[in-house]
Amino acid sequence: MSAGHHWRRRFHVSTVVFFGLLMAAPFYWMVINSFKSSREVVAYPPTWWPTEWHFENVFAALTFLDSTAIVNSVIFTAVITITQLTLVVMTGFALAKMQFFGRGALLGLFIMTLFVPGQVATIPTFILVRNLNWIDTFMGLCVPIIAQTSFGVFIFRQFYISMPNEILDAAKIDGANWGQIFVRIVLPLSGPPIAAYTAVTVLTAWNMYAWPLISTTERDMRVLPLALAGLGQSFSQTPPNIAMMAVLLSTLPIIIFFILCQRYFINGLGGSLKE
């Protein structure tokens, strides 16, 4: 039986390593090609290691990338993450622990929207944004995405339902109001789901392409994925090694973010409040 367990463990480890290498291969190829010359990138047979490292590609890629697009992506990601997180945490707590008229109907409405594909609302949302004169504005870029909070509200509600009521009752006995309970007790206990939701939201917002493409027409309102798409469309004018470097530079902030927050992200996925 121990021998069977040993072979199962080896099989699981081998499977994880295989798929890990399979997923890492495109990223490795992008990194290696980013530091090659343009001639070596398209050479056949391909080289698996640069014959000469071209670190000047970093500065060349920065000139091809629109600095405005980088700033817009940072603002877009920060606004969506902070605002969405604030809304879903407060709403999830209210639906889980506070008694008010229409709570069940409101919860049902949130759950119903989970079954509606986001693409269905794209055209009505665009018409609404256009009628509000929000095209090519940060309001039109951010507000429709911020409003997509149903999944986050549901997740945080489920988390707060597992929170013992005795903690809240003790705070009420001590004279704390709902605001004090939320800030001093609930938020400190909400670290794991906040970390997980923040990581997912940052990744989604940073890589978002479809809605920024629909809601913006001016170059000054482009986000980074749109700028990268422009490099692909003008591939004949953009050297392939520079295009690879631009993509690499655009992914580095997310990679660094996940490395720094990996422990909190994993705890958030597996964490739960224990009585």
Image: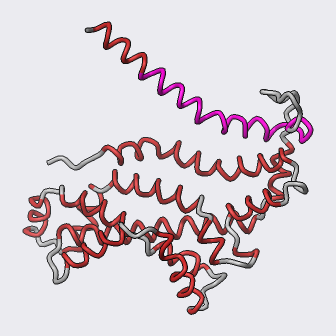
Q: Residue at x 59, y 60 (%)?
A: 206
Quadrant position of residue 96: bottom left
> What segment carries the magenta color?
12-41
Q: Is residue 179 magenta?
A: no
Is residue 34 one of those drawn in magenta? yes
Work out whether residue 90 or residue 152 is closer to the camera in this orientation and state it: 152
Looking at the picture, tell me which residue is in the foreground, 2 or 63: 2
Q: Is residue 51 left or right of residue 136?
A: right
Where in the figure is residue 33, as x and y percent of width and height?
79, 38
Left or right: 106 with respect to 175? Answer: right
Q: Is residue 111 above or below residue 124?
A: above
Q: Report the magenta stretch's main SS.
A: helix
Q: Nearer the viewer, residue 122 or 252?
A: 122
Decide which of 260, 162 is in the foreground and name it: 162
Could you tell me which residue is drawn at 17 percent across and 68 percent down? 97
Looking at the rendering, which quadrant does residue 38 occupy?
top right
